[in-house]
């Protein structure tokens, strides 16, 4: 089951609503022309930036991750800047982009990963608060904490100087889950369904099975057996493992540039790439399309990362730093970008 969406009957109405178009800010580009499109063939999307309307008491800071529940509600995390305490880190919207609720003041400054999993008849959020405590949280959809986890009690983290800053969670079909220490020491922890630590693997390095910023991780169920796919971001590759943590394969150089996260919908896998594009892969992990890909634009974006703080320089139909993205039940895509002031884009599938 996809951790970010649950295609039950209850999601059908949300899918219809999303397909007909949400409430969007800035639906036209700077020249006033129609909404630009990205992609080609069977994967064409109308790209609209500035999705979602916040009440006046709230503001976007650095947006990070996005997830969708079975009712179609969209959950977005943002980090929260120093000096602006008291802002919620999780914002919730309906499929049309209308604000529903927010929570998470206690995670201000650390809001990062967010994913949703069904447990029995209920759904729960799994949050990774990279620069705040608690580091990993299981919570209800309205923010009540079920359990929280701090630093793993294992030999890899015995030295108090060993960094631990988790970035994401992946859910296995048997109820177990994986936590990637993306901004810490590069390990991946496997936990049982009740939260007991089962295994630690990986660690820093460039060899097969080692990582430099295992930023996003995902259980890919498109094949005969589920596998763990890891965005080995600073090594510019995706690595695949068994659910026991045994290395299987890695992508060829150039397949991805700076991969941040993963989501799947049917046979398609998407990878938001922090270097200004979103890649789509088929079930054999061959590239279908690189949405928004433009070498000249990427060069500008990566020139000191200045553009992320210059919204007047952002171009319609182009991405700055896609940090996370997920499909909705209709195959549309929500994109959260690592930019100052935040930005959520809605990609409506039209081809």
Image: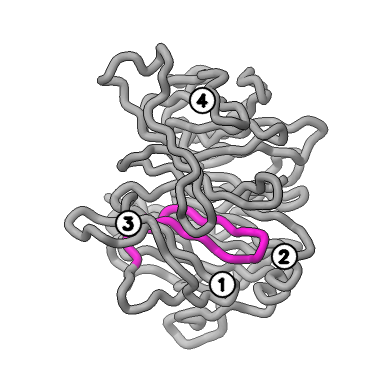
Q: Are marks 1 and 4 in contact (CB under 8 Å)?
A: no
Q: Range of the magenta residues?
A: 60-78
- Residue name at image x 51 percent, y 79 percent: 24
- In terms of depth relative to the viewer, which is nearer, 281 or 263? 263
Residue 94 shows which numbered tag? 1
In the rendered structure, find residue 105 and report the number of the disc placed on it.
3
Q: Earlier in the sequence, mark 2 or mark 1?
A: 2
**Mark closest to the chain's N terminus, 4 or 2:** 2
| Residue designated by label 2 | 11
In primary-sequence order, the first of circles 1 and 4 is 1
Left or right side of 278 for 145: left
In terms of depth relative to the viewer, which is nearer, 39 or 221?
221
Closer-to-camera residue (269/257): 269
Could you say which disc has been placed on residue 189 in the image? 4
SS type, badge 3? helix
Front-most of residues 318 and 241: 241
Mark 4 secondary-structure assignment: strand
Q: Where is residue 37 drawn, in percent x and y? A: 60, 71
Residue 69: say if magenta: yes
Q: Are marks 4 and 2 in contact (CB under 8 Å)?
A: no
């Amino acid at each position: 089951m996809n951790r970010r969406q649950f295609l039950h009957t209850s999601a059908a109405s949300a899918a219809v609503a999303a397909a007909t178009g949400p409430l969007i800010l800035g639906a036209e580009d700077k020249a006033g022309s129609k909404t630009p499109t990205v992609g080609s063939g069977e994967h064409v999307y109308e790209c609209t930036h500035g999705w979602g309307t916040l009440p006046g008491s709230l503001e976007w800071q650095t947006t990070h991750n996005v997830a969708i529940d079975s009712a179609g509600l969209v959950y977005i995390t943002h980090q929260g800047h120093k000096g602006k305490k008291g802002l919620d880190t999780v914002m919730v919207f309906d499929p049309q982009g209308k604000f529903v609720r927010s929570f998470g003041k206690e995670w201000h400054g650390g809001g990062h990963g967010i994913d949703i999993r069904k447990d029995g008849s209920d759904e729960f959020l799994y949050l990774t608060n990279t620069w705040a405590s608690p580091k990993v949280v299981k919570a209800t959809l309205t923010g009540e904490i079920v359990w929280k986890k701090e630093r793993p009690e294992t030999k890899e983290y015995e030295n108090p100087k060993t960094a631990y800053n988790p970035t994401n969670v992946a859910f296995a079909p048997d109820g177990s889950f994986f936590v990637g220490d993306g901004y810490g020491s590069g390990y991946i922890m496997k936990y049982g369904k009740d939260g007991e630590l089962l295994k630690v693997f990986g660690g820093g390095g460039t060899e097969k099975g080692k990582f430099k910023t295992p930023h996003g991780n995902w259980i890919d169920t498109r094949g005969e057996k589920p596998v763990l796919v890891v965005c080995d971001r600073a090594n510019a590759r995706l690595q695949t493992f068994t659910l026991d943590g045994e290395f299987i394969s890695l992508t060829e150089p150039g397949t991805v540039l700076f991969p941040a996260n993963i989501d799947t919908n049917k046979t398609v896998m998407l990878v938001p790439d922090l270097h200004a594009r979103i890649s789509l892969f088929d079930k054999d992990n061959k590239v279908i399309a690189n949405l928004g890909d433009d070498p000249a634009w990427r060069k500008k974006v990566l020139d000191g990362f200045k553009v992320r703080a210059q919204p007047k320089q952002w171009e319609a139909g182009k991405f700055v730093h896609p940090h996370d993205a997920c499909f909705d039940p209709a195959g549309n895509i929500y994109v959260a970008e690592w930019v100052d002031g935040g930005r959520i884009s809605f990609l409506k599938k039209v081809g």
